[in-house]
Image (cartoon, rainbow, N blue to C red):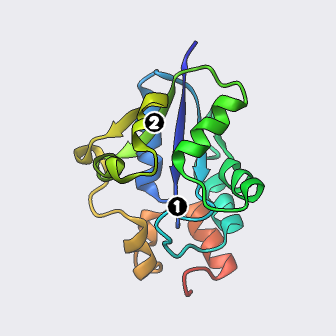
Amino acid sequence: MKNLLLFGGSFNPPHIGHMFALCYAMSTGKFKEADVIPVYKHAYDKELIDFNHRMEMCSLAFEWLRKVYVGNAEEALTKKRGGQIYTYDLVMQFRNMGVTKDIYLLLGTDAYQDMSNWHESEKLLKEITPFVVPRNLMAEGVSSSTIRKDVSKNRFMLPPTVWDYIQKHKLYDL
């Protein structure tokens, strides 16, 4: 039985760096499928555009990848509990739903180095295995925050379908 890969993030907006990281992970052959899970409410209270826009942009960004599913698990769990949830809560929700496979969490180097500051990090590390994409494999200078500063100028960092969606819905101050 192959492992399950979870790829959570703000995806504000999803960009080619996110796509590359997921393609790299899936190309290893370790994973049968991956779940892309946009955060509903950021744990560090970062400002995010509407969740539904981010869900749709993720669907557009990752639709061409086989066995990759974009899901609203965090939204559903947040609404069910009525408050902030964390990565550990989400992983335990998967376990409670009967997921017995090994769960891997796709992370960049920065997120991995910050994991000790995460809510219930020690418990989380007992439930998942980090799959860290090394910085030297990432697209240099590509980040959601850079894109948001001037989305028109930085549109080359976006999948064309995401750029079209941003234009259509006039997101990020277009």
Badge 2: few (under 14), some or many (20 or more) residues near its Cα, within 10 Å?
Answer: few
Can residue 65 be seen at all in this image of the molecule?
Answer: no
Q: Position of residue 122 (x, y in %)?
A: 39, 38
Q: Residue at x 66, y 62 (%)?
A: 83
The residue type indicated by label 2 comes to Lys
Q: Is residue 171 above or below residue 74?
A: below
In the rendered structure, the answer to whether residue 125 lies left or right of residue 137 reads: right
**Above-or-below relation of 24 to 28:** below
Q: Which residue is mark 2?
A: 123
Name the residue: 59% across, 64% down: 162
Q: Earlier in the sequence, mark 2 or mark 1?
A: 1
Residue 159 drawn at (x, y percent): 52, 59
Quadrant where the C terminus sits is bottom right
For the point 41% across and 81% down, which residue is it? 149
Mark 2 or mark 1, whichever is nearer to me: 2
Q: Which residue is at 66% across, 72% downward?
A: 50
| Figure quadrant of residue 134 | top left
Amino acid beneath label 1: Ser
- What's the CA distance linking mark 2 and mark 1? 22 Å
Whether residue 47 is visible here, answered yes or no, is: yes
Q: Percent position (x, y) of residue 65?
A: 59, 39
Q: Determine the residue located farthest toward the top in the rendered image.
A: 1
Q: Name the secondary structure under disc 1.
A: loop
Please count the marks in the image: 2
Please tell me whether residue 2 is drawn above or below residue 143 in the rendered image. Answer: above
Q: Secondary structure at mark 2?
A: helix
| Closest to the observer, 100 or 154 | 100
Q: Name the quadrant containing residue 69.
A: top right
- Screen quadrant of the N terminus: top right
- Mark number, residue 10: 1
Image side of residue 82 versus residue 60, left or right: right
Residue at far bottom of view: 173
